[in-house]
Amino acid sequence: MRIIKTLRDIELLKKKSQINRKEIEEYFNNVYSNIGKPEGKTIDEFSLKDCGIIVYIEDGDNVWDLEQIGLNPGDNGLLGAVPEWIDEQPIGEDKLESRCIVCNNEYVLSIFLLKNNMDNEVKNWIEDNR
């Protein structure tokens, strides 16, 4: 699991991992344009910390226990959450799924994952929440 709060987090992902999802960077830029820019912050000083982080779920992550981002095992983690907004974008033979889980009026978890990397339970959750 990769947690993204700042543009620097995206840059670090590009340098230190194989994750190079321009779609995630575009999403970050859109949130910045809607929230950070009106607040008078530069994109380099803008953080998602107070409005909702971006989370990239990787193959092998325990989706039933994502307590680190507020999706605890008692509620089945990601599989117990109901997304408010969904999107999918083709990425070669795969699809980049994005799900927004509204936690309250001011905080949204933006979850990204590659569908083909997930097990059948996650794929079923994706289909059930279309």
Image (spheres, rainbow, N blue to C red):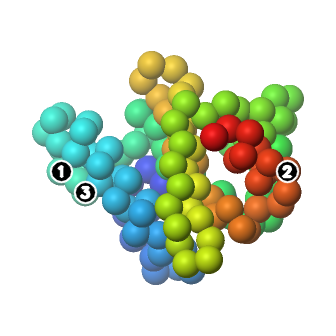
How far separated are the C-alphas under marks 3 and 2?
38 Å
**Residue 34 visible in the picture:** yes
Secondary structure, mark 2, is helix
Q: Secondary structure at mark 1?
A: loop
**Callout 2 crowding tier (Cα within 10 Å): few <14, some 14–19, many ≥20:** few
Q: Which residue is mark 1?
A: 42
Task: State the CA–CA distance, disc 2 to disc 1.
Answer: 40 Å
Q: Horizontal and vertical percent for residue 15?
A: 46, 80
CB within 8 Å, label 1 to label 3: yes
Closest to the camera, between mark 3 and mark 2, is 2
Which labelled disc corresponds to residue 102?
none
Q: Residue at x 62, y 77 (%)?
A: 93
Q: Is residue 35 left or right of residue 128?
A: left
The amino acid type of the residue labelled 2 equals Glu
Image disc number at residue 121: 2
Name the element at disc 3. loop
Q: Residues within 10 Å of mark 3 (few under 14, many from 20)?
A: few
In the rendered image, which residue does mark 3 sit on? 44
Residue density around tag 1, few if under 14, some if 14–19, many if 20 or more, within 10 Å:
few
Amino acid at pointer 3 = Asp
Question: 102 or 86: which is nearer to us?
Answer: 86
Closest to the camera, between mark 2 and mark 1, is 2
